[in-house]
Amino acid sequence: MFNFFKKNQPQSENLDVDKSTSLKQLLNKSRQKLGSSLSSLLLGEKEINEDLLETLETLLITADIGINTTDKILESVRKNASRKTLKDTESLYQFLKDTLDKLLIEDNQLKTNINETFVILIVGVNGAGKTTLIGKLAKSFQNQGKSIMLAAGDTFRAAAVEQLKIWGERNQIPVIAQTTGADSASVIFDAYQSAQAKNIDILIADTAGRLHTQDNLMQELAKIKRVIAKQNADAPHETMLVIDGSSGQNAINQAREFNKAVVLSGISITKLDGTAKGGVLFAIADELNLPIRYIGVGEGIDDLKVFQSKEFINALFD
């Protein structure tokens, strides 16, 4: 159950964490694993040699940067070192920070101001935090003056439908739902028609959690997209994968398979405050060339942040 059901929550115009807690503090475990470890490795050294690069390779991989992305980074480091662009480990540290920053896509904001209902389709594996993220997103959009509707497309879990219904009731947000076991595509189709008829600004559609290895369930997601597209070729306008930040390298496999099935347009990552695996963001952005939309750094309603690459980099390295 959501822990932010209170009707009279203090409202804010944007998604932000408690100002008393910095992002650096919230990402402390990932910061220690990546930024602090790099600093300890490089800033006490002077010479860039093969032994150092081998240690660096191991560090990046264990920080969940991923093998493929690490290989690209190390190749670039070797080229620049051979050209004497990188003269010492201090310059190497800054080079790595800049290289990781460039992997992250800057233009990650949802363009919801369109002349029709903006449809966000939420997908992901079981336990990633999809339903909770939907509640937080809806509240944020509502605080910005948007009209919101929710579609309870996770028809396999009665609890997921009930969560959305309760949340909707307490925040005056309509929720379109059917009985447990109903066809998910049908639920979302009905919700889209209702949202259009009522001139709703944003429709957020939940879907059942599924393993990325379950082909039949992945095909069901593709069906949902086809059904919506029959009504509007541009919808869903956003297909967002929600990933549990603690899943590490498995998150890359999830992103690959979901992208094959439904063509993702963005990724949100939850539970980053409790994990040292934040480096996986770089691997995902690099391998799939997809923007990170939001990061979850706590349980509260305001603990979902619009992802800002510079802020994220500075939290990990400065």
Image: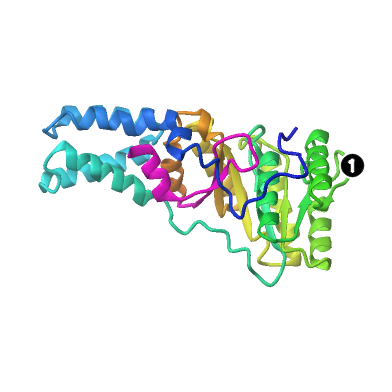
Q: Nearer the viewer, residue 143 or 161?
A: 143
Where residue 199 appears, x then y in whole percent? Answer: 78, 67
Where residue 158 appears, x then y in whole percent? Answer: 83, 35
Q: Nearer the viewer, residue 215 or 179?
A: 179
Q: Is residue 36 left or right of residue 196?
A: left
Residue plotted at (44% across, 47% down): 285
Q: Nearer the viewer, residue 249 or 103?
A: 103
Residue plotted at (18% across, 39% down): 90
Q: Is residue 14 left or right of residue 170?
A: left
Instruction: Say if the magenta span includes residue 300.
Output: yes
Q: Is residue 265 above or below residue 315?
A: below
Q: Residues within 10 Å of mark 1 (few under 14, many from 20)?
A: few
Q: Quadrant of the N terminus?
A: top right
Q: Is residue 302 left or right of residue 158?
A: left
Q: How is the image coloured?
A: rainbow
Kindly indicate the quadrant of the structure image that contains residue 39.
Answer: top left
Q: Residue furthest right?
A: 179
Disc 1 secondary structure class: loop
Where residue 263 appears, x then y in whole percent? Answer: 58, 53
Q: Is residue 130 above or below residue 290?
A: above
Kindly indicate the quadrant of the structure image that contains residue 156.
Answer: top right
Residue plotted at (12% across, 44% down): 82
The three-letter code of the residue at mark 1 reads Thr
Residue plotted at (66% across, 36% down): 214
Q: Residue furthest bottom?
A: 115
Instruction: Say if the magenta span includes residue 103.
Output: no
Identify the magenta region: 289-318
Label 1, on which residue? 179
Where residue 219 appears, x then y in whole percent? Answer: 69, 46
